[in-house]
Amino acid sequence: MSRQTAIDLAYLFAAITFVLALKGLSSPKRARQGTIVGAVGMAVAVVATFFHQENGQGLRNLGLMVGAMVLGIVIAVPMSRFMKMTSMPQLIAIFNGVGGGAAALVSITEFLHQDVKTLPTYVVLEVVLGVLIGAMSFSGSAIAYAKLQELMTGRPITYPGQQIMNGIIFFGALGIVVALLIAPTNLLLWILLVVALIVGVSFVLPIGGADVPVLISLLNSFTGLAVAASGFTLDSNVLIVAGTLVGASGILLTKLMSQAMGRSLPNIMFSAFGSATPSAASGGADDRPVRSGTPEDIAVMLAYARKVIIVPGYGLAVAQAQHTVNELAELLQSKGIEVFYAIHPVAGRMPGHMNVLLAEANVPYSELKEMDEANPEMSTADVVLVVGANDTVNPAAKTSPGSPIYGMPIINADEARQIVFLKRSMRPGFAGIENELLYDPKTILLFGDAKDSLGKLVTAVKQS
């Protein structure tokens, strides 16, 4: 067997593991195994690459390559190990951006080492796509990171004539692409890089916090496409396969997330959903009375229930209350009460955020039910405990045609016999609108930090 055949077989093995990894990631039960399988395949692909030869010579700059890999390990491992779950979306965003930036740099490097006058048009196109998409993903992910990390406002940033300006920038980038295909030059490529970075920023600025899960998924798809384009530039089958898988899965996930929000992708990207409203700016409270309770009152309600459904949201992650809510669930289960978690597809700030958060607290996978599976059981629940969720349980999505979230599938918490809402205040969610569920006669509010409130409920349930 020749060296190149062995390398190709290693790449084929890696490609198969990538497919198996995606299959594993489709289920919480197999997600960990899927991640390990994908990591093994990637390790095999990296090792095989070191044996690659061109014109009878091995790879050059091995010292730089190994040094860069060691630097990446030194930075990435501690970040991944010690990053708080509330910061996981930021980590995903910045890692995704690094991938897009790397793909753009690879394309630029290959272009600069070629005689542009003799380059076939299809090679120039591969380079141009890698630079355009990769740079957009890099700068867009950087802005997403800044929004999530609260280095800048999470609200949509808009200004008069923004759509027109964005259109000019975008079509300007396309014009540069056409010019490069006709008469490629190094200067035009650098100009394209700068314009692509601006496109990424202008693309993300008008997107609000409520749409961040979809944004992360879409940017992930962009990075995959950029990697596939750089794979064509390098004539690397394994990069083409890996990038295509990431791009395709990201697009499919984006589509599913859009459907879960009951909105089209263009509406999510360009409607500035979540902009400040008079209601939101004033604190979001109106003059209608609400019913609040004490931990002791709610503990009695929980302790004598037959079925309790917990609806987690981003507030659960902010309070780092996943372990406490699991303690409460286990306590109720020890009393013979049926307990499970209803997970909305866009709860949190990234796809699967609640699943990952609760898995960290060792919540059994069997207790996590997706929205479509949980909704039919809502009418049989004695108590629905809403922890940190807001827009994903707002009945306005079903009853108010003028509402910005009208048509969005929600968890039907309003169908339960009793609703308990854990909230810091009466401020609205990312959508900037009132939640009618708060004023439902069946709803009891427990104000305060979610972790502190859950801790008090645990103590009170033990004493009930």
Image (cartoon, rainbow, N blue to C red):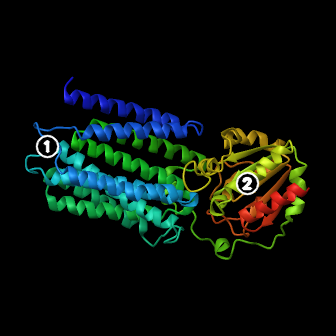
Residue wearing tag 2: 325
Query: What element does badge 2 sit on?
Result: helix
Q: Which residue is drawn at 46% across and 59% down?
A: 79
Viewport quadrant of the N terminus: top left
Give the crowd class for mark 1: few <14, some 14-19, many >=20 residues within 10 Å: few
Residue 112, quarter of the rendered image: bottom left
| Of callouts 2 and 1, the N-terminal one | 1
Residue 209 in percent (x, y) is at 55, 62
**Amino acid at circle 2:** Val
What amino acid is labelled 1 in the image?
Pro
Q: Write down the quadrant of residue 438 in the picture.
A: bottom right
Q: Can residue 97 be seen in this view?
A: yes
Q: Which residue corresponds to mark 1?
A: 120
Image point (23%, 51%), residue name: 107
| x and y percentages locating residue 405 in the rendered image | 64, 56
Locate the C terminus by quadrant. Answer: bottom right
Q: In this rendering, is residue 245 above or below 288?
A: above
2 or 1: mark nearer the eye: 2
Q: How crowded is mark 2: few (under 14 residues within 10 Å), some or many (20 or more)?
A: many
Residue nearer the viewer, 9 or 431: 9
Q: Which residue lies furthest to the top in this view?
A: 1
